[in-house]
């Protein structure tokens, strides 16, 4: 059990191993607290390889905390497009505004001050504090919880608050006075490259092999213990590509709730037949000319799964033109835009990626198209 296991012999082997085996990652090339902050937020719930181009593009567009604080919301969402969990970047901007107001535009160098910022919890505060400022603060994430559970053969549910508190306390007792950032990164690296979450751990590559109780007793296959979450709610949705030529209709989602403030294609919360889809387009105020069934798509959020079908509905140019206005306000419910503008300007959530891809292909009517009235 972790509370009965001495972690102190593990510190030096982990740090020495990291210096030799660490991956060359863009955010490890300096100790700029802004860079570390951006990378840690991006890496939450996102794979390392997926993060790399986003990290570089984000910093190229917003090289400082001041730039992040001042960034227009649509541009910010566009920079984050594809990473998901957009609340992460909204909270980053809120934190950047606080830093500008209270800390002169510089990331504070004290753990408690960093922790007080919007969207920053104990893990991120520990990572920034230790890596950027060499403060002896643990950074306990899923990787760290897993390797600690295995090395100490601890069967506590790692999703529990108690597991996180115990890990935090255990690590606080052994954090090195100098090099705490190296130790934290070493534990992250062990979890990412040796003590793997899925499949057999690569114990031969782990610096903790001779200390690890799970390796000694062969118990790694049922550690760590995780409680089962609630099953996801299933939602059926119909997505509409309302289109005339190169223009399609998009909606802006409300500023609160799921995918807040992002853009989407019109959709309803049920699967509609072609007849019902045409009727819905008419209710939206358009004159449908042709309908084509698009493929099915699925997207999984934390607590809900969307199972989608789609229709491309070609509409009268005159009807679509009626919706066009100059200087469309940002909070307008829906309006037509050019397909090329979507890729440049509007952040469409990855939930709609299959349908966004479909409209990038200039495709004429197919044999399966159904012309209204025929």
Image (tube, rainbow, N blue to C red):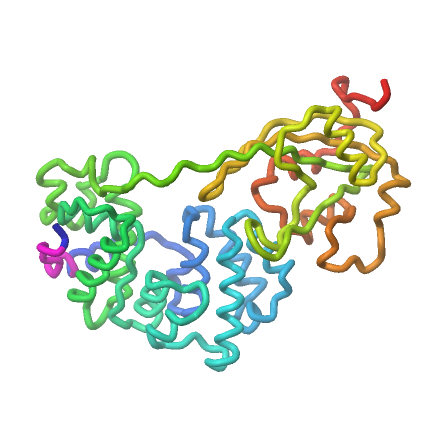
Report the number of discs.
0
Q: Which quarter of the picture shows residue 240?
A: top right
Residue at left offset 69%, top offset 41%: 266
Question: Which residue is farthest right?
Answer: 318
Left or right position of 308 against 208: right
The picture places residue 265, in percent across and down from the top left corner, at 68, 42
Above or below, 242 against 5 in this view is above
Please give the name of the residue rendered at 67% of the width and 34% of the height, measured from the top-left corner: 358
x, y percentage for residue 311?
Answer: 70, 30
Residue at (58, 63) in percent of width and height: 61
Q: Residue 34: which quarter of the image?
A: bottom left
The main secondary structure of the magenta stretch is: helix
What percent of the width, then of the height, locates residue 191? 27, 48
Say above or below: 145 vs 116: above
Q: Nearer the viewer, residue 4 or 50?
A: 4
Q: Is residue 8 magenta?
A: yes
Residue 361 at what x, y percent from top left? 71, 34
Residue 210 placement, left or right of 264: left
Q: Residue at x 81, y 60 (%)?
A: 327
What stretch of residues is rendered in magenta? 3-11
In-front residue for pair 356/251: 251
Q: Is residue 260 magenta?
A: no
Using residue 68 as the reference point, say whether residue 8 is left or right of it: left
* Quadrant (top left, top right, bottom left, bottom right) of the C terminus: top right
107 sits left or right of 141 in the view: right
């Amino acid at each position: 059990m972790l509370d009965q296991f001495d972690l102190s012999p593990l510190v030096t082997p982990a740090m020495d191993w990291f210096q030799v085996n660490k991956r060359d990652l863009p955010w490890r090339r300096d100790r700029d607290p802004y860079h570390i902050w951006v990378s840690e937020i991006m890496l939450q719930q996102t794979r390392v390889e997926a993060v790399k181009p986003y990290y570089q593009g984000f910093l190229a567009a917003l090289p400082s905390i001041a730039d992040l604080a001042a960034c227009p919301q649509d541009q910010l969402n566009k920079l984050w497009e594809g990473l998901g969990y957009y609340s992460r970047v909204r909270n980053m901007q809120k934190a950047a505004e606080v830093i500008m107001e209270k800390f002169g535009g510089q990331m504070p160098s004290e753990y408690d001050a960093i922790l007080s910022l919007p969207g920053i919890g104990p893990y991120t505060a520990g990572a920034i504090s230790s890596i950027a400022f060499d403060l002896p603060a643990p950074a306990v994430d899923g990787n760290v919880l897993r390797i600690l559970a295995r090395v100490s053969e601890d069967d506590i549910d790692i999703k529990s608050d108690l597991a996180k508190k115990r890990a935090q306390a255990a690590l606080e007792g052994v954090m090195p006075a100098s090099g705490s950032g190296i130790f934290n990164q070493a534990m992250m690296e062990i979890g990412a490259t040796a003590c793997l979450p899925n499949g057999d751990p690569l114990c031969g590559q782990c610096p903790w092999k001779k200390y690890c109780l799970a390796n000694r007793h062969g118990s790694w296959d049922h550690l760590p213990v995780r409680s089962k979450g609630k099953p996801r709610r299933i939602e059926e949705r119909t997505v509409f590509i309302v289109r005339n030529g190169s223009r399609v209709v998009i909606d802006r989602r409300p500023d609160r709730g799921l995918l807040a403030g992002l853009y989407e294609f019109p959709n309803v919360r049920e699967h509609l037949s072609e007849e019902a889809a045409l009727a819905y387009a008419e209710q939206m105020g358009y004159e449908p000319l042709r309908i084509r069934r698009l493929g099915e798509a699925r997207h999984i959020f934390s607590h809900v799964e969307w199972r989608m079908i789609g229709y491309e509905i070609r509409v009268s140019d005159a009807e679509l033109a009626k919706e066009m206005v100059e200087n469309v306000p940002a909070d307008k419910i829906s309006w037509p835009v050019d397909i090329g503008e979507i890729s440049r300007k509007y952040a469409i959530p990855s939930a709609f990626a299959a349908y966004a891809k479909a409209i990038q292909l200039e495709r004429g009517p197919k044999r399966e198209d159904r012309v209204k009235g025929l």
